[in-house]
Structures are given as C-alpha cells and as structure tokens.
Amino acid sequence: MDRSILEGDPHSVLESMIIAGFAIGANQGYIYVRAEYPIAVQRFSVAIKQAREYGLLGKNIFGTNFSFDVEVRLGAGAFVCGEETALLESIEGKRGQPRIKPPYPANAGLWGKPTLINNVETYANITRIILNGADWYSSIGTEGSKGTKVFALGGNVVNVGLVEVPMGTTLREIVYDIGGGIPNGRDFKAAQTGGPSGGCIPKEHLDTPIDYESLKQIGSMMGSGGLIIMDDTKCMVNLAKFYLSFTVDESCGKCTPCRIGTKRMLELLEKISGGEGTLEDVEKLEELANSIPKTAICGLGQSAPNPVLSTFKYFREEYLEHVQEKVCKTGECKALAKIQIHEDKCKGCGMCKRNCPVEAISGEPGKIHHIDETKCIKCGTCISVCPFHAIG
C-alpha cells in the first residue's frame, strides 16, 4: 500500500512532510524505504529533485526563515524496522532493534532529538484534509475511525489488488462486492488482516465493519492493510505455523519472550501439524501465546502470537482434530492428510485427474474417479480444483 503511494503520488507524501516540518519546527526529514522497492525509491528521489527545483525544499523556502530538506534512507527489508524506534536505529546506521520506551520519539528520537514519525499513508492524507477541511474528512468512515483505508486484497478471491474503501465497510462488501467472491464456488473460511501479526476473521464475522475498534474486538488488527482471503481448503493450524515461521525469522532477538518464546511456539505447531502433537502441546502453545504479548519489548513480539490466538478462538476444533484424530481434513498438513474422493459427490468431471501433478487419479468421464494412494503426494491440488467439493 505504501509502495503504491510512493510510486504513484510521491508529491503527496513529500508535501505533507514539508507541512509537518513547518508545524513542529523541524528542518530535516527522512523517508525510509526498503531497498527491494527500487521504483518507489527512484520516483520519490525524482519528486525530491523536482521540489528543490521549484523552491519547495531547501534554504529559506519562498523567502521565509523556514528551511527544510528531505533525504531517502534505504532499509534492508527487516520486518522489525516497521516498529518506530527500530526504524530510527536503522536510519542512524545501527542494527534495527527497538529501543526501550520511554523516552518516546517525540521526546528523544533520531539522534536524540524530538522526532515526528508517521506512516506513508498517514502523510498522504494531510494535504487532502487541509484542502477540503476536517469536516469533509470526518464525514467519511465511522465515529472512531475516520477517512478511508487502502487494503491489499489477495488470496482466494476473484479480484485481487489494492482497494480503497471508507472505514466501516464490512468484510462481506470487500470480499463479495469488490473482490468478486471466492473462486471455484468454494466457501469463505477466514480472512487474515494486519499482515503476519494480524488475526483471522471467521465466517460468522463477515458483516463486521472494518475499522480499528471493531477489528480489535474480534481479535484482529488493521496493521498495514493486508487482507488475505481464505477458502475452505485452508488449514488454520498450517496457517498459524506459516505466519509464526515468518515472525521467528524476523525477530531481532533483543528480548527473550520474542527470541525464544516464538521459537518454542513454532516447534509446538510443527509437532502438531506433523502428527506428533498432544493435548498437552496444545495447552503449552496457548499458554505461550497468552504470555508473550505481555512480556515482549516491541510490537513485533507483542503481536506475533495473534495468528495462533485468533485460530484458537475461532478454529480450536482443527487443533483438536490434529492431535486427537490425527487428521488434517484440508490435506495441507501432509503428515496428517487423508485425501479421498466422496462417491456421493463426484460427478466424474475429470478436473482432479487433469490437474494431478503425479497422475495419481484415474477414472472415465462421467464416472466416479479414484485416487491411487501409492502415488498420491498429498499436495491438495485435487481438493482446490474440484468444483463439486467431492474431495477431502
């Protein structure tokens, strides 16, 4: 979302940074961009050059005593540098690790000086608010969450891409009206909001308005605006493992709860998805997931257990199936996958046979198909392509 703004309208961010600098009496600004976004870096650098040529940046802007300039700083892509103090450390040329707070950046930020730090999307709204007025902006959204929000809509949805909607738009409207619904006639199962540290929203909350307060109440978060849609072929245990593996890799290692606690959680998830989990492991996993947010230093560690906590809250039965019945009904956990064709649903369309990568499915058109378990690699392709939901 932020990258699209920097690539498509860099001057909106630059102008707002100048305004912010004037408001607080700052004379230097920094835009922190991942080096993996070369187009964003190039276009924002062009915008800075153009602003200098027009006298919008530099010494004594428009003949006043206000001087302000902006510099681009490249980051190595560390997820933890999304935390404000870790970002400041990285700009200073240090390892990106969060600082102990207080002091907060507003009192002692970059090089110990008071610092205003905001997200690109936040800055991009400032000029619109000034031009159109606070009443105009407040007329959009909900009582507690004003304006619009840009989401990166992806996953099992027909229309993927960036969407901008008023705060308070329901998840159902985003998935079905804007996103076009779930492909292949599958059922909606969950939506992951807020990125790797967000939570899962189940089917019963499809009519939840998307705003800061509502998402928090159901165990999720707005985060950066990621919105991943999942159909009924997805395993929530495997999903929690996927996201936790990311946060384990991205942990800076500064505090013990995040460095070690998330690693232990991942080990328990791997044990459960591998068919060796017990009810005691489920209890240990839940205990860790509840204690780490209370003890980690920064937002990464505090929110890392969210995928586990939300899947426990709404999909606990899947954890119990994994440890008690030793089965993963979606087939995503390969050690527990038991893929079979249900004869009462199979129409013999051949979609599974045509898409099987190892030719483990046989059958004549219009007749019930069969899976050769000696060849099946439990990849789950047949489950995802079957239009009649006959495999699982």
Image: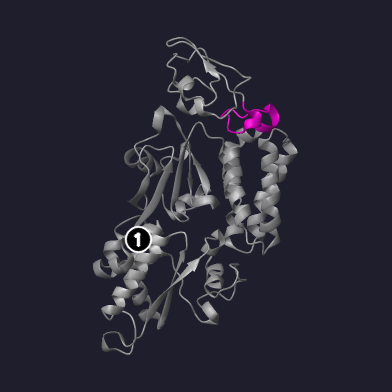
x, y (%) of residue 209? 40, 47
Where, quadrant-wise, is the C terminus in this rendering? top right
**Which stretch did the figure color magenta?**
321-337
Q: Is residue 382 left or right of residue 153?
A: right
Residue shown at 69% from the left, 53% from the top? 261
* Quadrant in the picture for residue 158: top left
Instruction: State whether residue 113 is above or below residue 207.
Output: below
Picture quarter containing residue 19? Answer: bottom left
Residue at x-position 36% and y-position 81%:
22
Q: Residue furthest front?
A: 358
- Is residue 67 left or right of 53 when viewed as pictured? right
As for residue 326 lying within the magenta part, the answer is: yes
Instruction: Please state the horizontal and vertical placement of residue 199, each as a whole percent of the image.
Output: 53, 47
Compare residues 108 and 137 and report the one nearer the observer.
108
Q: Which residue is more in the foreground, 126 or 65?
A: 65
Pointer 1 residue: 7
Does the magenta portion include 130?
no
Residue 260 in percent (x, y) is at 71, 55
